[in-house]
Image: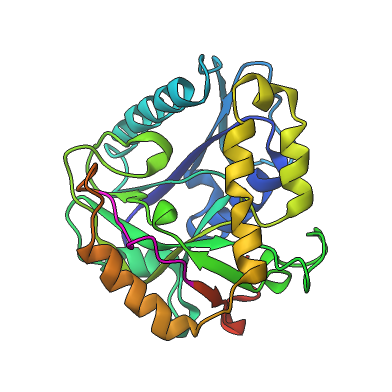
């Protein structure tokens, strides 16, 4: 079995970080998690026992500049970790890399058997909220027992598992100078915009407003509208189609990122995922 580490960086985001630590800790062990707090004013949560948590100087700048600095920092940390580990998973705290339960494999088992040279990506699954069927998210149940619909998204098909030192682009969306490979039956679930109430709360966060995040958050709320208004398609058939399409199609401005010809594919998430996260 390959030795695997996972890293992320957060600021004022205990809700998602708690789920991130819980999931990846169960998959690869808490001792193999690296969490960086964006700003030395951040307090290490008392529920992070066993996790290497480090508060660092706050990354300066507005959204674009700060995001570049954040990924430069994380790329450097990942390169250092690859001296000790076989693979490094780099994702945001609201992103969970999941192997399809139908395989009956853990994440480490899947990644240890996967054939890739530099990186492997999960197919992007942007989970939304069907406002006519689903209420506010609660901590009393798993995320995927409360949310049943998603948009298949190129934005979250990220080269998030690396086997060699690389330089990630902003948001882990691509690796500079390298292609990407989408693993079969591997999915990156994004939960950042799966609850309308939490999106509104982020609008009111002074630190996010000061950093220029308002337009970004408003843009992302469209996932909820698309999930609510869309007609969901079959998961297995549609994810197979999306994987092929994203492998073949590339945007003209970035050959090493996936494209899907502006198609909006809404799917219903199968019950077999419900208790995972």
Q: Total label count?
A: 0
- The segment highlighted magenta reads 257-265
Image: 205 above or below 163: above
Q: Residue at x 65, y 53 (%)?
A: 19
Instruction: Residue 79: give x, y in percent of width and height.
Output: 29, 33
Quarter of the figure that contains the C terminus: bottom right
Q: Quadrant of residue 262?
A: bottom left
Residue 53 showing in the rendered view: yes
Q: Is residue 254 left or right of residue 47?
A: left
The residue positioned 35% from the left and 69% from the top of the image is: 110
Instruction: Indicate whether 256 appears above or below 201.
Output: below
The x, y position of residue 33, in whole percent, is 50, 43
Residue 188 image point, x, y percent: 46, 60
Given residues 61 and 48, the one toward you in this image is: 61
Please name the predominant secondary structure of the magenta segment in the image: loop
As drawn, 113 above or below 42: below
């Amino acid at each position: 079995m390959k030795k695997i580490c996972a890293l992320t960086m957060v600021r004022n985001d205990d809700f998602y970080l708690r789920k991130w630590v819980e999931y990846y800790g169960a998959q690869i062990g808490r001792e193999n998690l690296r969490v960086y707090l964006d700003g030395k004013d951040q307090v290490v949560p008392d529920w992070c026992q066993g996790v290497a948590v480090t508060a660092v100087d706050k990354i300066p700048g507005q959204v674009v500049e700060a995001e570049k600095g954040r990924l430069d920092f994380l790329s450097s940390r990942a390169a250092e970790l690859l001296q000790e580990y076989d693979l490094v998973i780099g994702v945001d705290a609201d992103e969970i890399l999941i192997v399809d339960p139908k395989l009956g494999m853990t994440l480490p088992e899947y990644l240890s058997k996967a054939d890739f040279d530099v990186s492997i990506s999960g197919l992007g699954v942007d989970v939304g909220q069907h406002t006519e069927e689903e209420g506010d998210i609660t901590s009393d149940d798993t995320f995927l027992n409360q949310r049943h619909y998603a948009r298949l998204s190129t934005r979250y098909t990220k080269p998030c598992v690396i086997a060699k030192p690389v330089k990630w682009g902003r948001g882990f969306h691509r690796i500079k100078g390298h292609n990407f490979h989408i693993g079969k039956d591997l999915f990156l679930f994004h939960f950042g915009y799966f609850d309308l109430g939490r999106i509104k709360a982020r609008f009111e966060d002074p630190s996010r407003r000061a950093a220029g995040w308002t337009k970004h958050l408003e843009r992302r709320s469209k996932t909820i509208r698309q999930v609510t208004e869309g007609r969901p398609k079959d998961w297995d058939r549609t994810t197979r189609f999306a994987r092929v399409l994203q492998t073949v199609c590339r945007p003209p401005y970035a050959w090493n990122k996936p494209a899907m010809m502006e198609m909006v594919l809404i799917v219903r998430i199968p019950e077999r995922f419900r208790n995972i996260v």
